[in-house]
Image (cartoon, rainbow, N blue to C red):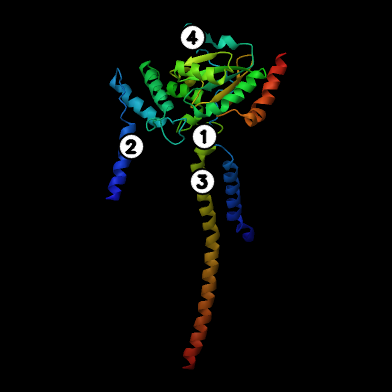
Amino acid sequence: MNRLALFVPLALFAGLSLVLLLGLDKDPTELPSALVGERFPAFNFPSLKTEQQFVSEQDFKGDVVLVNVWATWCFACRIEHPKLNALSASGVKIIGLNYKDQRVEAQAWLAERGNPYQFNIFDPQGQLGIDLGVYGAPETFLVDAGGIIRHRRVGVVDDRVWDTEFRALYDQLTGSEQ
Amino acid sequence: MRLAVFFTLCFSVLVFAGAEVVEFSEESLRSRYQDLVEELRCPKCQNQNLADSNSPISKDLRREIQRMLEEQMSDQEIKDYLKSRYSEFILYRPEVNKNTWLLWASPVLIVLLGGLIVARHRRQAKPMESKGSQEAANDQRRLNALLGDEENQQ
């Protein structure tokens, strides 16, 4: 009994090490999303194309879409952009949320790099960003046909992220839709 | 000297972060604002509160809190508003729920556990002590006998 008790500190140490080891794999900059499973917030904002045209969540109702938060000041968005173009070409519907940006610069960006978006929401104050819990760009939300947010990615969506995080869920959502 | 420079630098940073002028219609809102921005965490910068952080998102959230205060929302409503968007991460004082009860209870549990261990140790130590003193008495008797023998011999 006493002999075994001598191993208690070792066991505690091993347990603690295991917990800390598992913690190493976690990304501390990734916040748990409060919005997965929630309805995409209602909004009514001008589109990026023109001030006169307003867009709202009704404009993508009934479709499975990606909502991509981007800005011209966001360096990672440059890296992400080709992937969005490819996804768009393969039939994925993407809505852009132009976040805290200048209209002219954003329009020039799309002209230069290609436009993967169905349309863009222009949010220079970051108001919709706050409603979505956005704390940086790029961020990408997968919204189902019922307008419910099903997945959120903070950071770049590249081939690996699409294959591991989005593809299965996206296929499932679009498959069940038909 | 080096220390003085260090402290000057420390405080200048603090002053810089707090230098933003915020206007309120009522003076009572200011202290509530101050409490809130000190207790809410910047979502972008991990270990700074909204008051200390200069990141754009913190500026936006400070402005948002100011707006909500002016709209007569309660502190709890403001916290709930931000929590529903940025998750519990934004609260530096997490609420008690099924994920955090262990965190909140752990100080009490650890003190109780410590008390239990100490109590057990004492109970075990007592018979050991009496046994020890018995042994000591035996030793003393043997010693006395030996010494006594020696004394007798002298």
Q: Residue at x 42, y 35 (%)?
A: B48
In the picture shown, does residue A88 fall above or below A18? above
Confirm or deny contact between disc 4 and disc 2 (CB under 8 A): no
Secondary element at image label 3? helix
Q: Looking at the rendered structure, which numbered label has been put on residue B13? A: 2
Amino acid type of the residue tagged 2 in the rendering = Val
Confirm or deny contact between disc 3 and disc 2 (CB under 8 A): no
Q: Mark 3 points at which residue?
A: B110
Q: Name the residue under label 1.
A: A29
Q: How far apart are marks 3 and 4 (CA)?
A: 62 Å
Secondary element at image label 4? loop
Question: Who is closer to the viewer here, A59 or A30?
Answer: A59
Crowdedness of circle 1 by 10 Å Cα count: few (<14), some, many (20+)?
A: few
Q: How far apart are marks 3 and 1 (CA)?
A: 30 Å
Secondary element at image label 2? helix
Discs 4/2, front:
4
Q: Where is residue A161 in the image (x, y as percent from the top left)?
A: 63, 30
Q: Which of marks 4 and 1 is nearer the N terminus?
A: 1
Q: Position of residue A154 (x, y in %)?
A: 55, 28
Amino acid type of the residue tagged 3 in the rendering = Ile
Res. A159 image quadrant: top right
Q: Which residue is drawn at 72% across and 18% down?
A: A175
Query: Disc 3: which chain?
Result: B
- The residue positioned farthest toward the bottom in the image shown: B154
Confirm or deny contact between disc 3 and disc 1 (CB under 8 A): no
Query: Is B141 placed left or right of A146 in the picture?
Result: left
Q: Which residue is drawn at 53% across and 34% down?
A: B100
Query: Disc 1: which chain?
Result: A
Crowdedness of circle 2 by 10 Å Cα count: few (<14), some, many (20+)?
A: few
